[in-house]
Image (cartoon, rainbow, N blue to C red):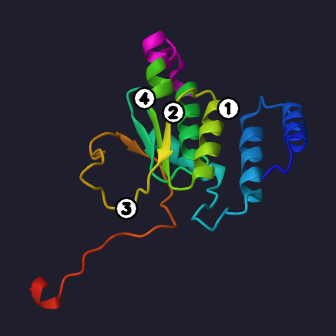
Amino acid sequence: MMPTPRVLANVVDQLDAIDMADRDTKGDLYEYMLGKIASAGQNGQFRTPRHIIQLMVEMLAPTPKDVICDPACETAGFLIAASEYLMDHHSKVIYKDAESRQRFNEHTFHGYDFDSTMLRIGSMNMLLHGVENPDIRYKDSLAEPDEASDDDEETYSLILANPPFAGSLGCKMMSPSAAE
């Protein structure tokens, strides 16, 4: 929390002075900020090392046709790595025209979390990494879907995630006699 507007202005000025051309600088800054948030680790947020994220993305090799989801996105590290992979390997396709740019910026990346602080950080992080309007929103991915919710079953072509480490599954128990 920023105790006063003056402290916030000072933080923004100091951040503005940092050279953000290096992608790792942005990531390191977000990891530092995450570590300073009081709830970090209490709601299941745990840092996935960058080299592991990059390895997973490289193994899946996303294409501009993919629709990518991280159902426990936290700071959106997996989505950012996927966007960087796409920019590095398919920039001519994703930036070839207005329709392709819009698809990349608005329809390719989807992230869910149940921590509103992580949602704000993830959205900001995606924007800082060049994705203008990703679908980052509140959702408990472990919760049972209700009849009013949309069905995501066939929506995504790639899932990039660390499993959520908090939450609960609504499991129905069967009696031993019913299982026979």
Label at residue 143 = 3
Do the numbered discs 4 and 1 sit on residues whose CB atoms are within 8 Å? no
* Amino acid type, label 4: His
* Amino acid type, label 2: Pro
Give the mark nearest the N terminus, 3 or 1.
1
Q: Estimate the x, y position of residue 138 in percent, counting from the top left.
A: 48, 49
Q: Estimate the x, y position of residue 163 in percent, counting from the top left.
A: 48, 60
Tag 2 residue: 134
77, above or below 171, in the image: above
Please state the total of marks drawn on the protein image. Answer: 4
Q: In terms of secondary structure, where does tag 2 sit?
A: loop
How far is mark 4 from mark 3, CA to CA? 24 Å
Q: Residue at x 43, y 43 (%)?
A: 69
How far is mark 4 from mark 1, CA to CA? 17 Å
How far is mark 2 from mark 1, CA to CA? 12 Å
Q: What's the magenta region?
A: 88-101
